[in-house]
Amino acid sequence: MISDSLGFILLIFALSALLAIWFSKNRTNSANRNKTRFADGLRAIVVGDRMRAMRILRETAIEDTSNAEAFILLGDLVREEIGPRKALQIHHSVADRKTLTPAESFRVSKSLALDYSKIGDHEMAADILARALKSNQDNWTKELLIEEYEKLGRWPEAFDLLSSFKNAALQHKGQLALYKVMMGNSAAENEKYHNARILFKDAIRIDEECPSAYLRIGDAYYAEGRIADAIEWWKKFCAKFPKIAWTSFERLERAAYDLSDFGSMITFYSKFISANTEDFRAREALSDLFVRMGRLDDAITTLQGEFEAPIELEIKLLALIQKRDNIAGEIGELIGTICLRACGKYKYTCSSCGTKINDPMWYCFECGAWNSFGI
């Protein structure tokens, strides 16, 4: 993500051009000490010596107050080394100048947006970037604004802006589809389930390989009490995305319970396992269902066979055998304790920030990462 790259994309973005300009001018005026010092500051940034770069740029800015770029770069460094609020002071002092060129004005706008984003004022960051884009349709700025829209939950704006990229329908169809899903989720939260389904189906039209859209269509039908329609879409989800079908199993079981038809789930799981012999989660779900129905032998048989099972499933099988054979004493207690520790309810964990959630999501609201929950 752009805003997670230590705030130095702006620096790198400008360095090559600035160095080229300096070398061109320096050949005709080798005595210009200020330009030499400015170039020294740029070199210090390139080699990663930030403290030296800050010192040189501060000296350069003091010696030549008209050097707006020196102030802007100094502020960018200060944001990372000292903090965004101090950087805001520096960047605002530049932005308030009446003598800025259009390029300098655009440049400082991007730095200000990064400052505000860093302190958590995403509304202000988005406003600055949106105004900057009116004068320069820079892709970097668009991408940063998209990130700000994501953090604010402004999915329609994010969708429209990403759609403006060249070949967006091909290169960004997955992301565009997920934006439609997020819009649909917002509609569903407001109990506008019909509108939500329209948006979810829009997502599928954009990218038919968008699993969350299928899942959420079922959720919207279920919320309206249209259980048969919900089951139909959840089963479509399982058929199309068998590797993550397990994320819908609890939904399907809840619907079967509402219809007092657990027999249909036994049939569903059995067919699914036949078509996906290595899917241990379907076996686990069917085994758990048999346990709840009091069919302990069937539960054990379901977990036995030639397939690669995680240690948690083997522990669960051991616990079922202990229960069936009434293994008591210290061994029985130990098996029970191990099972409780190893067989808790599964949580989805964000690979980016470690956030744990109970329901499958394709966007982490804590860190803004997409597709980070391993599904």
Image (cartoon, rainbow, N blue to C red):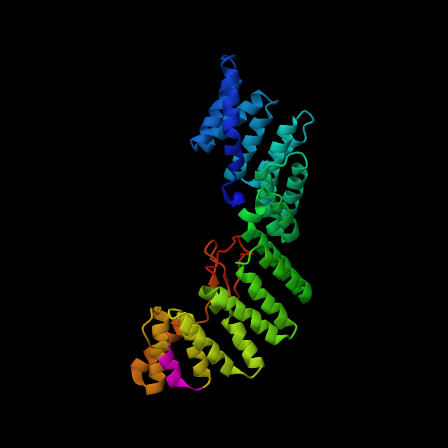
What percent of the width, then of the height, locates residue 305? 32, 75
Left or right of 103 on screen, residue 272: left
Name the residue: 46% across, 68% down. Answer: 346
Name the residue: 60% across, 32% down. Answer: 107
Left or right of 347 on screen, residue 71: right
The reply to whether the magenta stretch includes residue 245 is no
Left or right of 333 on screen, residue 70: right
What percent of the width, then of the height, locates residue 94? 63, 30
Q: Would you say the magenta stretch is mainly helix, strand or loop? A: helix
What percent of the width, then of the height, locates residue 256? 54, 79
Give above or below for 115 relative to 72: below
What percent of the width, then of the height, locates residue 300? 36, 81
Seen from the viewer's position, the closer of residues 277 and 45 is 277
The magenta segment is 294-302
Query: In the rendered image, is residue 326 in sight?
Result: no
Give above or below for 224 relative to 93: below
Seen from the viewer's position, the closer of residues 263 and 44 is 263
